């Protein structure tokens, strides 16, 4: 049975965690980094990638905004050694 994705919840999860990354100053402290659950954000994006066809126009717009925000902090993600789930998508055949 396929997993049912709550699109709004996944969008909010990923967006909220990304907001924390966007406001994090580098260099970071270990205590700052410990508060991130980046795996939750990555999981949310991956579930959303499989649900794009089911999204409303509002949800698609919010998803595209999330994609652009992640792209704008991609260098910070590399420094933090965080996976960028949209990079995986670009390398798929």
Image (spheres, rainbow, N blue to C red):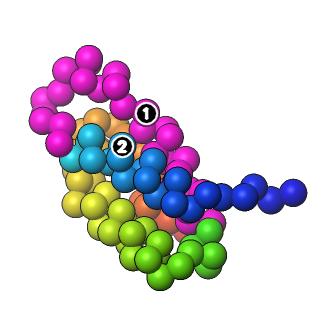
If the image is split into quadrants, where does the N terminus sit?
bottom right
Figure quadrant of residue 81: top left
Magenta stretch: dominant secondary structure:
helix
Labelled pair 1, 2 in contact (Cβ < 8 Å): yes
If the image is split into quadrants, where does the C terminus sit?
bottom right
Residue 55, position as x, y percentages in the image: 56, 75
Q: Magenta residues?
A: 23-50
Q: Is residue 89 left or right of residue 70?
A: right
Residue 42, position as x, y percentages in the image: 48, 47
Residue 3, position as x, y percentages in the image: 75, 55
Report the residue that reaches farthest toward the bottom. 57
Could you tell which of marks 1 and 2 lies nearer the N-terminus?
A: 2
Q: Badge 1: few (under 14), some or many (20 or more) residues near its Cα, within 10 Å? A: few
Figure quadrant of residue 33: top left
- Examine the rendering and report whether any part of residue 87 can be seen: yes
Is disc 1 placed on a helix, strand or loop?
loop
For this rendering, which residue is in front, 50 or 15? Answer: 15
Q: Is residue 64 above or below residue 69?
A: below
User: Can you identify the residue that label 1 sits on?
Assistant: 37
Q: Is residue 2 left or right of residue 79?
A: right
Residue displayed at 23% across by 53% down: 73
Residue displayed at 18% across by 37% down: 24
- Examine the rendering and report whether any part of residue 93 can be seen: no
Q: Is residue 84 above or below residue 29?
A: below
Is disc 2 placed on a helix, strand or loop?
helix
Q: Alpha-carbon distance for marks 1 and 2?
A: 7 Å
Report the residue that reaches farthest toward the top. 31
Residue displayed at 44% across by 77% down: 58
Figure quadrant of residue 86: bottom left
User: Can you identify the residue that label 2 sits on?
Assistant: 17
């Amino acid at each position: 049975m396929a997993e049912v994705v709550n699109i709004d919840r996944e969008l909010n999860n990923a967006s909220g965690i990304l907001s924390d990354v966007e406001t994090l100053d580098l260099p970071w402290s270990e205590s700052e980094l410990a508060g991130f659950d980046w795996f939750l954000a990555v999981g949310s994006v991956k579930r959303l990638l499989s649900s794009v066809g089911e999204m409303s126009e509002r949800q698609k717009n919010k998803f595209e905004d999330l994609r652009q925000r992640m792209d704008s902090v991609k260098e910070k993600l590399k420094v933090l050694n965080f996976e960028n789930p949209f990079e995986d998508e670009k390398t798929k055949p």
